[in-house]
Image (cartoon, coloured by chain):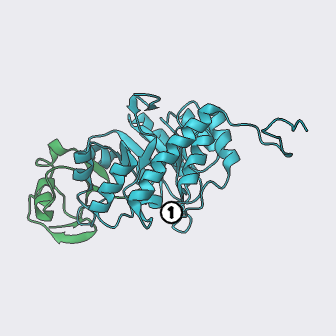
Chain colours: A green, B cyan
């Protein structure tokens, strides 16, 4: 299946969760947040939230700015 | 703490809020932040593969509170989602709300800004909106429950200073929440003027991070904010058209 992760089309294994995608990105364990199709997925639900085929995942962190 | 800045339920000894954008590297940023004496500093939210990581660790190490912003957002929906992501990532419900109209001016988009502010206040956020130097909009933002209002002196990154000091005074005169001068500061006298006009604090980034010597400029801004605050409290003399001798008239 496919999902758009941080703007890039990615091939994901069936049954992938938000946690799988974070592993794939090598995201740090803290200081990040995830939106799945425009809705925030709380940290506690990362491992149990499936990423549906064709969905959009955004993984954000703090950077220098403002 | 003498004369603290109070926003919502938090007190700050420093009235200088810093941004972290524009610094050549984290080491320069660190020294500038320390020299500024700031206790509250903004960060932006971007995709994890973007450059600029490490700023969170730096702020934590320095004991500076993090203020996430919604920089780059062009509409209320985008800004609200970014604020929610920041709350999740950084475990703070404080947000510097920024909704800009276009890339050329980076001026706040007032309708979207007010809409986003209202939604975020309803969702339990402590909202600090970056706004136009518009006394009417500032009132509206306060009315929907913002914890401060942050009018611009001039557009972001221009260093043009405070282009409409009278509007800033009007905002201060009617505000029941802290007024924080945000954007447009170019040099120390601009920061001092903001405080003399009655602002409670100053937020700046570029003026320090892109100065030829960020460390010295940070120290200058710190002193300017303190000087302006003192001058405001001291009560300046009225401006006069004609001279007024400061020595007694000669006796001969």
Quarter holding residue A55: bottom left
Q: Identify the residue at image location x=47%, y=52%.
A: B220
Q: Is residue B102 visible?
A: yes
Quarter holding residue B88: top left
Quadrant of the drawing holding the C terminus of chain B: top right
Above or below, A42 relative to A23: above
Q: Position of residue B98 (x, y in %)?
A: 47, 52
| Chain ID at mark 1 | B
Quarter holding residue B171: top right
Q: Identify the residue at image location x=16%, y=54%.
A: A18
Q: Position of residue B20 (x, y in %)?
A: 36, 56
Q: Identify the residue at image location x=43%, y=67%.
A: B212
Q: Position of residue B157 (x, y in %)?
A: 50, 63
Left or right of B21: which side holds A32? left
Q: Residue furthest front?
A: B252
Depth check, front residue: B76 or B211 = B211
Left or right of B54: which side holds B36? right
Depth check, front residue: B207 or B121 = B207
Above or below, B9 relative to B208: above
Depth check, front residue: A18 or B69 = B69
Q: Secondary structure at mark 1?
A: loop
- Crowding around mark 1 (Cα neighbors within 10 Å: few <14, some 14 to 19, many 20+) is some
Depth check, front residue: B213 or B68 = B213
Above or below, B232 relative to B150: above
Q: Identify the residue at image location x=43%, y=65%.
A: B210
Q: Position of residue A58 (x, y in %)?
A: 26, 59
Circle 1 sits on which residue? B157
Quadrant of the drawing holding the N terminus of chain B: top left
The number of numbered badges drawn on the structure is 1
Q: Is residue B44 visible?
A: no
């Amino acid at each position: 299946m496919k999902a758009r992760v941080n703007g890039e089309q990615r091939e994901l294994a069936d049954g992938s969760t938000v946690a799988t995608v974070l592993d794939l990105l090598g995201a740090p364990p803290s200081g990040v947040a995830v939106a799945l199709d425009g809705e925030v997925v709380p940290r506690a639900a990362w491992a149990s939230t499936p990423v549906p085929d064709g969905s959009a995942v955004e993984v954000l962190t703090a950077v220098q700015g403002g | 703490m003498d004369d603290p800045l109070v926003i919502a339920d938090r007190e700050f000894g420093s009235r200088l809020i810093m941004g972290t954008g524009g610094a050549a590297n984290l080491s320069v940023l660190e020294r500038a932040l320390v020299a500024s004496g700031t206790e509250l500093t903004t960060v932006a939210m971007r995709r994890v593969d973007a450059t600029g990581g490490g700023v969170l660790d730096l702020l934590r190490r320095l004991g500076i509170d993090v203020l996430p912003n919604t920089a780059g957002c062009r509409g209320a929906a985008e800004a609200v989602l970014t604020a929610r992501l920041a709350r999740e990532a950084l475990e703070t419900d404080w947000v510097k709300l920024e909704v800009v109209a276009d890339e050329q001016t980076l001026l706040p988009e007032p309708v979207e800004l007010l809409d986003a502010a209202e939604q975020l206040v309803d969702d339990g956020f402590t909202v600090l909106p970056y706004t136009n130097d518009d006394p009417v909009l500032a009132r509206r933002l306060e009315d929907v429950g913002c914890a401060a209002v942050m009018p611009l002196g001039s557009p972001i990154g221009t260093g043009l200073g405070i282009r409409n000091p009278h509007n800033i005074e009007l905002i201060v005169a009617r505000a029941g929440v802290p007024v924080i001068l945000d954007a447009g500061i170019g040099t120390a006298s601009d920061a001092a003027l903001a405080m003399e006009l009655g602002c409670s604090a100053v937020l700046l980034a570029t003026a320090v991070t892109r100065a030829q010597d960020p460390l010295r400029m940070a120290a200058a801004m710190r002193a300017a904010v303190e000087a302006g605050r003192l001058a405001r409290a001291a009560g300046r003399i009225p401006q006069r058209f004609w001279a007024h001798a400061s020595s007694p008239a000669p006796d001969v």
